[in-house]
Image (cartoon, grey):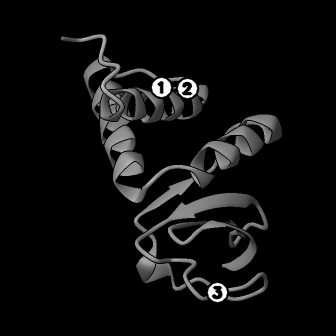
Amino acid sequence: MKIRKILNNNSALVLDEDNQEVVVIGKAIAFKKKVGDVINPAAIEKKFCLSSQSLNAKFQEVLVSLPLEEISVVSKIIDEIKMRLGKKISDSIYVSLSDHIHFALKNYEKGNSYYK
């Protein structure tokens, strides 16, 4: 998988084996890498191939500001929802939930908690 765009040290946009754009996430997966470098498949913790180009672009924007821990939490939450519901969930949940959790944590750190 070749890097097309580095999102942050822990995520990158790559072309997969089927020549599809995919967002990959893993600890320091893009650290000291550049566009065109190959990603080690063993370093990939999560792979996201969202249904539309615009959704994929929005997800990339959100990922730039997220720490790996938050991405992992969101992924675990969505996996649990899928398992419990047993139904397909819109890919847009990755964008909206990631964004929501990130800003909720930022507000909490600032003391702006709505859950006191």
Q: Is residue 60 above or below residue 23?
A: above
Q: Which residue is mark 2?
A: 96
Q: Is residue 74 above or below residue 63?
A: above
Give the secondary structure at mark 3.
loop
Local crowd size for mark 3, using a 10 Å CA cut-off: few (<14), some (14–19), many (≥20): some
Q: Is residue 66 above or below residue 8?
A: above
Quadrant location of the N terminus in the rendered image: bottom right
Give the secondary structure at mark 1.
helix
Kind of residue at badge 3 = Lys
Q: Is residue 91 above or below residue 21?
A: above
Which badge, 2 or 3, is on the more N-terminal residue?
A: 3
Query: On the image, which quarter does residue 23 sit in?
Result: bottom right
- Across and down, in percent, residue 82 comes to 36, 28
Q: Which residue is rendered at x = 45% and y = 36% of the image?
A: 102
Which badge, 3 or 1, is on the more N-terminal residue?
A: 3
**Tag 2 near tag 1, CB within 8 Å:** yes
Q: Which residue is mark 3?
A: 33
Q: Which residue is rendered at x = 57% and y = 78% of the image?
A: 30
- Observer-nearest of 44 and 8: 8
- Across and down, in percent, residue 99 comes to 53, 32
Q: Which residue is mark 1?
A: 100
Q: Which residue is rendered at x = 72% and y = 85% of the image?
A: 34
* Mark nearer the viewer, 2 or 1: 1
